[in-house]
Image: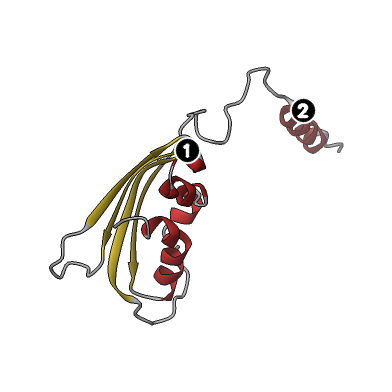
Amino acid sequence: MHRPAPALLAAAALFLAACGSDEPTTPATGGGSDQLAELVVTVDADGAEGQPAKELKVSCKEPTDSDACGAAAGISAADLAPTPDDVACTMQFGGPETATIKGTIRGQEVDASFSRSDGCEIARWDKVKPLLDQVR
């Protein structure tokens, strides 16, 4: 008995994969926003212990708009992603500091929290440290 079905399915899949659209695509910046960053960065140097957290609002189109904009330009939304649950982290304490970064970077929504509670969190903190250091 002859079975043409698998060959037809493969041909159909190849045909559909080759189909495209004449519609223009949106840039990978998340909608073509002309803003580099629109962020609220909060740093609490002693965690919840007493000193109030400090906050910085960053709004810029170009990295040269300010030192904070230059620091934000070096950060991607991927740098703000939480550590995946299946990653093992060293058990070391880097300090009580906590921070948040909320808003948009290159048109992508971000809402990230940081601490220095273990090796993975310290590494995440270090990726965004130039921006966190702008909060005074």
Q: How is the image coloured?
A: secondary structure
- For the question of whether residue 122 can be seen, the reply is yes
Mark 1 crowd level (few <14, some 14–19, many ≥20, 10 Å Cα): many
Q: Position of residue 36 (x, y in %)?
A: 47, 38
Question: On the rendered image, what quadrant is the N terminus found in?
Answer: top right
Q: Is residue 76 above or below residue 91?
A: above
Dot 2 falls on a residue whose secondary structure is helix
Q: Which residue is mark 2?
A: 15
The image quadrant that residue 134 belongs to is bottom left
Could you say which disc has been placed on residue 18 in the image? none
Q: Is residue 22 above or below residue 54?
A: above
Residue 131 rendering spot, x and y as whole percentages: 41, 55
Report which residue position mark 1 lands on.
36
Q: Residue at x 46, y 75 (%)?
A: 88
Residue 26 point in image, percent of width and height: 57, 27
Q: Which of the two marks, 1 or 2, is nearer to us in this view?
A: 1
Residue drawn at (44%, 80%) of the image: 90
Q: Is residue 5 left or right of residue 81?
A: right
Residue sitting farthest toward the top: 22
Q: Amino acid at mark 2?
A: Phe
Position above or below: 116 against 40? below
- Mark 1 lies on a secondary structure that is loop
Q: Quadrant of the C terminus?
A: bottom left
How many labels were placed on the picture?
2
> Position of 96 compared to 31: left or right?
left
Residue 23 or residue 71, whichever sits in front = 71
Give the side of residue 120 with respect to residue 5, left or right: left
Relative image position of residue 66 (x, y in whole percent): 43, 44
For label 2, the crowd category at 10 Å Cα-Cα, with few meaning under 14, some 14 to 19 and many 20 or more, is few
* Residue found at x 78% / y 34%: 5
Amino acid beneath label 1:
Leu
